[in-house]
Image (cartoon, rainbow, N blue to C red):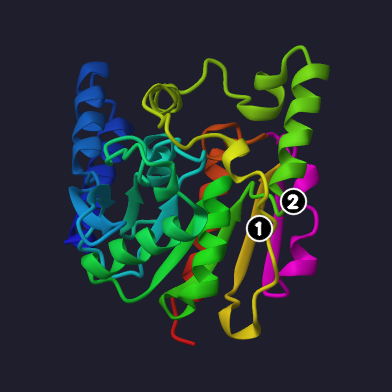
Amino acid sequence: PIIRAVLSIGMFASLTRALLINSQVSLRRETMISMALMSVTSQPSIDEGYATVSRTESDNYSLYYRIYNKDDPKIPLVIVHGGPSLPSQYLYPIVDNVDKRPIIFYDQLGCGKSDEPKQIEYYSISQSVNDLESLLEQLDIPHVHLLGHSFGGNVAYEYCRHFPARVKSLILANTSTNMKKCLQEYNRLEKSSPSFWETHACRQVPMPGLLLDAMKHGGRTWCGMEVVVDYVAEPLVPESQRPTLLISGKYDFGTAAAENWHEILPSVENDVVLVNSAHYIHVEADARVFGEILSEFMAHHDVDD
């Protein structure tokens, strides 16, 4: 079906060029043909649902997920959001800039459309890792490319420590190795920069609607860098390391806290800095480049080892 769609577009394009050469098409008809071409391009399918995660034998909770292009045969990309507790919709624009494949988003426990238990002891990085494994087990997905943004990168990194067999590649986007250092740098820049947010967080003005919506629906029980301030990334054993892409924005507030990934993780293959971006690189000026880099990296590691 995809090949047929491409051929159909080619035939429409040829027809349009012939009509224009012969000067027999009005501006109105050109517009109608352009609209027809746009309608041929398929939109990604969307599947939504809930997985179940547990904290005790009797305490079970719902974890919301959204899957784009579920039936595509490529290895899925699983995207882990940051925060903690900034729900996943702010990352949906990634779908528009990467090559077609299954893309899975989910709201971690405590935010968005997932349940938000009030017991603080039900939250931790290790429990977030186990929740991700429960989700992938219930979706019956054997292998994934794993992308974590900001704090989500720490969850993804720790997932590799415990469940490396499921991971084909690891992508860390603006992820710090030392959360205390990241918080200190955030506070320093916030005090010293009169335009902190527009310079070091999101350089896209006005701020994208999905990012605003995520902030509006963020969790309140377990949220912010303060709740994971003691986290420091420790090296993985060789068996848990996976081919890794580091990608970050030049102006990101956490840059100083992400400089030693190469020392911790020898499996880093690429380290890309996008010069026009800050923390939310997937919606800033380099968004398309960000998607192209992800697509190329994943395609390279789609093949079996």
**N-terminal-most mark, 2 or 1:** 1
| Residue 53 coordinates in the image, percent (x, y) | 27, 57
Residue 96 magenta-highlighted: no
- For disc 2, the marked residue is 258
Residue 283 to residue 272: above or below: above
Q: Residue shown at 49%/52% (left/top)?
A: 124
Q: Residue at x 60, y 45 (%)?
A: 228
Residue at left offset 28%, top offset 41%: 114
Q: Which residue is mark 1?
A: 246
Mark nearest the camera among 2 and 1 is: 2
List x then y, in percent, for residue 233. 68, 61
- Foreground pick, 113 / 293: 113
In terms of depth relative to the viewer, which is nearer, 17 or 259?
Answer: 259
Q: Is residue 300 visible?
A: no
Element assignment for label 1: strand
Residues in magenta? 250-276
Q: Label for residue 99?
A: none
Secondary structure of residue under mark 2? loop
* Above-or-below relation of 56 to 203: below
Please state which of residues 252 and 226 is positioned toward the viewer in this rendering: 226
Instruction: Name the amino acid type tagged 1.
Output: Leu
Type of the residue with mark 2: Ala
Q: Is residue 221 left or right of residue 235?
A: left
Find residue 268 and report its image quarter: bottom right
Residue that protrudes farthest toward the top in the picture = 194
Image-quadrant location for residue 17 = top left
257 is within the stretch colored magenta: yes
Q: Residues within 10 Å of mark 2 (few under 14, many from 20)?
A: some
**Residue 96 in view in this figure:** yes
Q: Position of residue 249 (x, y in %)?
A: 68, 41
